[in-house]
Image (cartoon, rainbow, N blue to C red):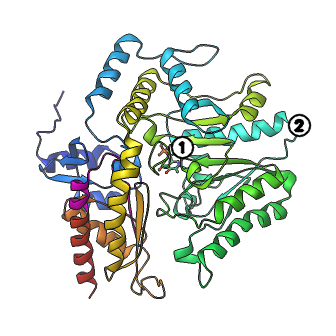
């Protein structure tokens, strides 16, 4: 067998990659033009690529490596678990210690009566579970016509048929016949881009009230659930106005519909709390989790379910749903150790008392930059809006995303990973980032913004 290793020349690796590896959200033409950037190792907040460059990862991979890269404790737990019990399933009345211990720990961390975990391998799978779970709940309650789920345009819940339908990303809906039936979308609480002359508070209320209008339009007896990310992540780190979530909660309570908080990004310390719902006082019936649950060291996700929904569904016989890797023992053992490390090392305190205050101060100062309309940050997830006119919050005349992409490329050139969503730059560094590393981050981000701005003239 040909040995393909980290030591091969980058060009050869790129050629093999382009020939055999189909990438998510990537066009062949782009791979052919430049080749993929090949990451060979990582430690703390730094990646190393096949050219030996040290790149600061301002995105914690895909918003997931909360604990930072290269933690030996997690590798050791995985090896130990593989030797002891590499796999067993959790179907048909079987279980194992890693799945039990992790579920108990998650139930301890989750607020309210979110006491039950249904495992999945990813956030997408977990949201597919949620569609089936809430529909099953209403079937058991004798209201099978309550099968509609309402979500938001520009929300992101994954890319499978179900989760991609829940999401409100038009490029995803444009391919393959999404959304599936009985999923409806309402406008997002994006004040900076869509708020016009309203104050953020007025706009937050107006956008939340779209939910009530949609429920009335569809018929309250048809609506099963509402799903939303406490803070939209992939949509551009959109922090909703303070009035938004309390009004959404009021409307869900009024019509007795289930509330699902998609915490795939906002869970496990990203916002400085264990869950983003706690930041906004949201009381969900179900939370979707993945990413930071294992800090990305193993693929695992799930739904944290409240007593009422879990007892109703579980009490009605078999719930005919599950994945081979539900509660995979290696992934569960890694996730449990990750949660222990987050606690033993007081990483949420680090976010709240050290990393957030310092990054926030330096991030907010970027609003002085001629290209930056707003800079916002909650915990360690943030964004900046690029604009040609700060006063009017105008969009660029170019195709949306042109300037953002240029800025992202300048970041890469300056050894910093910052992602763009249209013309917003988004960040979510590992939660362990230090003040010294934040200085490097800001220095590289500022240089990239300067170069991007100079290129526009
Ligand atoms: N939900 C949210 C809020 C996400 O941000 C993502 C991924 O970015 C998902 C669900 C899908 O998770 P996965 O990519 O693990 O399927």
Residue 203: x %, y % from top left:
64, 74
The C terminus appears in which quarter of the rendering?
A: bottom left
SS category of the residue bearing label 2: loop
Query: Which residue: 68% across, 43% down?
Result: 131
Q: In this view, does 168 lie above or below 289?
A: below
Q: Mark 2 points at which residue?
A: 142
SS category of the residue bearing label 1: helix
Residue 330: x %, y % from top left:
41, 23
Q: Is residue 421 above or below residue 90?
A: below
Q: Which of marks 2 and 1 is nearer the N terminus?
A: 1
Spatial CA distance of label 2 from label 1 is 28 Å
Q: Is residue 73 above or below residue 227?
A: above
Query: Which residue: 55% across, 53% down?
Result: 279
369 on left or right of 309: left
Q: Mark 1 points at which residue?
A: 124
Which numbered circle lies on residue 97? none
Query: What span is in magenta?
Result: 425-441
The image quadrant that residue 367 belongs to is bottom left
Q: Give 165 or 330, whichever is nearer the viewer.
A: 330
Question: CB at mark 1 closer than 8 A to ligand 1?
Answer: yes
Residue 278: x %, y % from top left:
58, 49
The image quadrant that residue 202 belongs to is bottom right
Residue 217: x %, y % from top left:
83, 65
439 on left or right of 272: left
Q: Is residue 342 above or below residue 77?
A: below
Is residue 410 visible in this depiction of the protein?
A: yes
Query: Which residue: 19% across, 45% down?
Result: 13
């Amino acid at each position: 067998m040909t040995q393909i290793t980290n030591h091969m020349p980058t060009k050869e690796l790129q050629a093999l990659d382009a020939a055999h590896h189909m990438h998510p959200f990537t066009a062949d033409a782009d791979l052919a033009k430049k080749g993929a950037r090949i990451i060979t190792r990582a430690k703390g907040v730094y990646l190393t690529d096949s050219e030996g460059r040290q790149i600061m990862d301002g995105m914690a991979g895909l918003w997931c490596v909360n604990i930072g890269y290269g933690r030996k404790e997690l590798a050791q737990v995985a090896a130990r678990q593989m030797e002891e019990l590499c796999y067993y399933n959790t179907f048909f009345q079987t279980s194992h210690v890693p799945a039990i211990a992790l579920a108990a720990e998650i139930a301890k961390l989750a607020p309210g009566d979110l006491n039950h975990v249904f495992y999945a391998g990813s956030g997408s799978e977990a949201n597919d579970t949620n569609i089936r779970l809430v529909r099953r709940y209403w079937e058991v309650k004798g209201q099978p016509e309550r099968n509609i789920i309402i979500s938001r345009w520009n929300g992101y819940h994954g890319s499978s048929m179900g989760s991609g339908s829940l999401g409100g990303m038009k490029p995803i809906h444009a391919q393959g016949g999404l959304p599936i039936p009985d999923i409806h979308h309402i406008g997002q609480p994006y004040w900076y881009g869509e708020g016009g002359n309203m104050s953020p508070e007025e706009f937050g209320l107006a956008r939340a009230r779209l939910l009530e209008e949609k429920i009335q339009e569809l018929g309250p007896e048809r609506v099963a659930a509402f799903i939303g990310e406490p803070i939209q992540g992939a949509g551009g780190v959109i922090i909703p106005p303070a009035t938004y979530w309390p009004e959404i909660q009021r409307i869900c309570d009024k019509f007795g519909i289930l509330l699902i908080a998609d915490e795939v990004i906002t869970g496990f310390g990203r916002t400085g709390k264990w869950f983003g719902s706690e930041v906004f006082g949201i009381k969900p019936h179900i939370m979707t989790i993945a990413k930071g649950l294992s800090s990305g060291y193993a693929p695992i996700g799930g739904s944290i379910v409240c007593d009422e929904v879990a007892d109703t569904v579980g009490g009605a016989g078999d719930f005919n749903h599950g994945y081979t890797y539900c509660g995979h023992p290696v992934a569960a053992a890694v996730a449990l150790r990750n949660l222990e490390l987050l606690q033993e090392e007081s990483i949420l305190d680090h976010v709240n008392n050290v990393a957030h205050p310092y990054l926030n101060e330096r991030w907010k100062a970027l609003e002085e930059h001629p290209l930056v309309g707003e800079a916002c940050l909650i915990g360690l997830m943030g964004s900046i809006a690029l604009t040609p006119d700060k006063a009017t919050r105008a969009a660029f005349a170019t195709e949306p995303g042109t300037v953002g992409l240029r800025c992202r490329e300048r970041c890469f050139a300056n050894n910093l990973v910052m992602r763009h969503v249209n013309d917003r730059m988004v960040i979510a560094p590992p939660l362990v980032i230090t003040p010294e590393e934040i200085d490097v981050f800001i220095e590289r981000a500022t240089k990239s913004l300067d170069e991007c701005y100079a290129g526009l003239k």
